[in-house]
Amino acid sequence: MTTVDIDPALIAAAVEWARQDPDDGDRAVLEAEIAAAQAGDGAAMASLASRFAGPLEFGTAGLRAEEGPGPGRMNRVVVRRTAAGLATYLLQRLAAMAPGETADVSADPAVDATESTATGQESRPPRVVVGYDARRGSKTFAQDSAAVFAAAGLETILLPSELPTPVLAFAVRHLDADAGVMVTASHNPPADNGYKVYLGGRMTDEAGRGAQITAPSDREIAGCIDHDAPVDSIPLAADGWTVADRGIAASYRLAACRVLDPERTGHRRLNVVYTPLHGVGGAVLPDLFEDAGFERPYTVPEQAEPDPAFPTVAFPNPEEPGAMDLALAAARDRGADLVIANDPDADRLALAVPDPAAGVGESGAVAGWRMLTGDEVGVLLGSHLMAGLRPAGSVVGNSVVSSRLLSRVAADRGVPHETTLTGFKWIARVPGLGFGYEEALGYCVAPEMVRDKDGMTAALVAAELAAELADQGKTLLDALDEIARHFGVVATGQLSVRVADLALLDAMMTRLRLAPPATLAGQDVVETVDLTQGYRDLPGTDALMYTTADDSRVVVRPSGTEPKLKCYLEVVRPVEAATQLPGVRAEASAALAELSASIGAALGQ
C-alpha cells in the first residue's frame, strides 16, 4: 500500500458529503474510502481527490460521468442540485416572458397535447417530462428529479417505465412540455450515467422545440445550479407529479409508422435479426415493426432484456469490436436479410448485411456479414427519402464531420442541403429539415415527431428500403454500388486518441495549430481551416479541417462526451465503369489507412 500525506480539507469535504448523501450505497463507499485515506492509503486518497476535484460541468450535453459519490460523479446529490437549478431556470424564464409572448397549447399531461384547448396557458407553470433508461441509478435519478420539480411547482410528468431516449424526445413535443430530462449515458461504459436536457413549449422557438439545448441555454441553466446547496435544503415532494400513461409508447409507435411511404406498403417481407444490446430498445422496436406490417424481428435472446452490466459486450456500442458478434451469429444461423442494432438508449442505429464477397457456406447462404458505416447508412436513408422531400421543399443535412457524399446526392436531385456543427442539437435545428444524420450512427428521419436522432424510426425506414430492394432482387450493397457509380467511391473512417488527462486534448490541438501538416498521405494539403473562426455559415467550434489535393479530408476535434481526440477521415475516388468498383474500393480502403497513419503521425502517435 502506498502511503501519502493526508489532506485535511479533502477529508473534511468527503465527511460532509457522506453526512448528507441520501444514497446508502454511495455513502458506504465514501465512508470506506475516507477511513482508508485516514489510515494513509494513497489509492484511497487519490480516489477522493478525483471525486472532489470539482463539480461536474453542465453543458449542451447536460451531465455525463461515472456513478458514485462526490461532486465529480453522477449521484443523487448532483442530480437533485441540477434538477433544482433547471427548475429555477424554467421559472425565471417564464416569469420574464411578456404576456402572450409565446403560443402554447394545453394538454392532458399524461395523454395528448393535440386533443386540448389553449385557455389560460400563460399562467400555468412550466411543464417538464422526465424519462430514464435501465442503467443502475437511472430510475432513482429520474424519481428524485420529479420530486424536486414537483416541489418547485412545476407540472411534472414521469414516464411510466424504462424507455428509449427517442420516446422522451417525442414526449416533449407530444405533451407540449416546456422541458424534458432524459437520464441516460447512451452507449458509455456500464459505470457511467448522464442527465440530458431538452427544451420545448414556451422555452424555445419552433426550430428548437423538443431538441437538445444549445448555448446560451446551457450556460444559463448552469448558472442556476448551486453546487454547494445542502441536500436537505432542496425541497422534495412526496407526490404531486403525474406518471404518464403506458400508452405513451403506443403513441410513439403510431407516430413512427407514419414515417413509412403509404405507397410502399407491399414491401414488408424481411427476415430481421435485432439486438438492443441489453438496453431499452427491446421495449419498443419489435412491437413497432409489427405495427408497421413487418414480421416481428428475431431478438438476440442473450441481449434482449435490459441489463446495466451489459454482460455480453466489452463496451455497449454497436461500433465497438465484438458488440455485434451474437447478432451476426444469429443472422448466419437464421439466414437473415438484415441485422439491426440499437445502442442501449436506442437513439442510434447500426446495420449489418450479408456480404457475397465473403463467399457461401455449406447451406448455400452467404457466409459473411458486413457492418455498414454511419456514412453509408446516412446516404442510403437520405437518398431513399429524397423523392418525398423534394416536392415538400424539405432540406437534408449532416454534420461537418460526416461525409460530403449526401450533399452531392442532394445537389444532383435538386434537394437543398445544409452542413452543421457536430451534434443533433445543431442538425435538428436546420430550418425545413426533412432528414439529417451524423456519422456516429445517428439519424433523424421524422423531425416533426422526434427532433433528435432516433434509432427506431431510422430502423423502420432502413427496413422499408431493404424490403423494397429485395423485391427487386437487390440489396443495400447494390444500392451503395449504384451511388458509387454516380458519385465515386467514398471511404470514411475515424482515428480516436483516448487520453487519461483532458489537458492533453488541448495540447494536441495546439500542436496542430502551431505546426499544421503540409502533406497527408503523400498529398499536399491545399486547404487548412481552423473552425474556431467559423466556416462558411457555421459558428465557431474547436476543430481543424484539412483537405488534400486528391479531395481527401480530415477533421480533427475533441470529443464532447469522452476523453478522446477524434479524427474523421474521408477519401474520394472516381469510378469510370461498374467493373472498376472492386478495384477502386480496394484503392480507397488503402488510401484511408494511409491517411489515418499520416494524421496519427502529425499528432505524435
Image: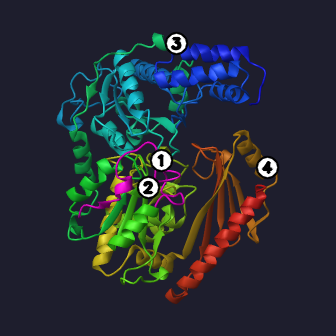
Q: Nearer the viewer, residue 42 or 290?
A: 42
Provide the residue designation for mark 1: 424
Earlier along the polypeptide chain: callout 3 or callout 1? 3
Q: Which of pointers 3 and 4 lies earlier in the amino acid sequence?
A: 3
Quick one: label 1, few (<14), some, or many (20+) residues within 10 Å?
many
Q: Amino acid at mark 3?
A: Pro
Q: Which tag is nearer the camera, tag 3 or tag 2? A: 3
What residue is rendered at 33% in x and 37% in y?
Answer: 172
- Tell me if residue 399 can be seen: yes
Badge number at residue 230: 3
Circles 2 and 4: CB atoms closer than 8 Å: no
Instruction: Give the labeled residue for mark 4.
Output: 511
Specify start and end residues of the magenta stretch as a single range.
295-324
Question: Could you tell me if the residues under marks 3 and 4 are in contact, i.e. CB atoms within 8 Å?
Answer: no
Give the CA separation, mark 3 to mark 4.
43 Å
Q: CA distance from mark 3 to mark 2?
A: 43 Å
Q: Any magenta on residue 305? A: yes
Closer to the camera: disc 2 or disc 4?
4
